[in-house]
Amino acid sequence: MRRAFLFLLLLLATAHAAPALLVGVASVIDGDTLEIQGVRVRRFGIDAPESSQTCTKAGTVYRCGQRAALAQGGLVKGKTVTCTPKSKDRDGRTVAASSTR
């Protein structure tokens, strides 16, 4: 009986364990999405235009999605990125808080 109880406790503890950190050099997908270790990660709290998206400012169309991706690239280039998964989005991507070092 005691073994069954301990097994159940272990099972419950692992079922609610925090998802594993993703750590590594990131590839930029777009302004709010990275890929680390083959996993697509949407950065928590960031909503940026898609890479192919255009915007208009003062009557001039510009590639705001490209600018967002380039800005993201400048933030992570040559750095180790650590992502702490929080959830999944509607497209199945991991949503994670991230930091660089």
Image: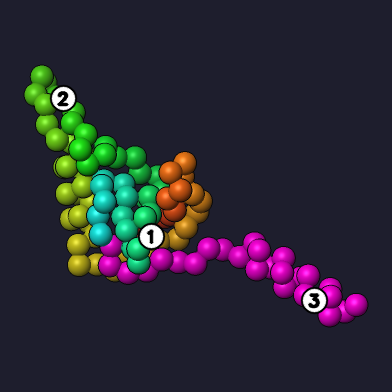
Question: Disc 3 vs disc 1: which is toward the camera?
Answer: 1
User: In the rendered image, which residue does mark 3 sit on?
Assistant: 6
Question: Which stretch is magenta?
Answer: 1-26
In this view of the protein, can residue 75 be seen by the observer?
yes
Q: Residue at x 71, y 69 (%)?
A: 11
Q: Amino acid at mark 2?
A: Thr
Q: Position of residue 34 (x, y in %)?
A: 31, 55
On the rendered image, what quadrant is the N terminus found in?
A: bottom right
* Of the image marks 1 and 2, the number of the one nearer the N terminus: 1
Q: Can you identify the residue that label 2 sits on? A: 56
- Give the CA distance from mark 3 to mark 1: 34 Å
What is the three-letter code of the residue carrying label 1?
Val
Q: Which mark is residue 17?
A: none
Percent across and percent down for residue 14 are 65, 68
Q: Position of residue 57 (x, y in %)?
A: 14, 24
Distance CA(mark 2)–CA(mark 3) = 61 Å
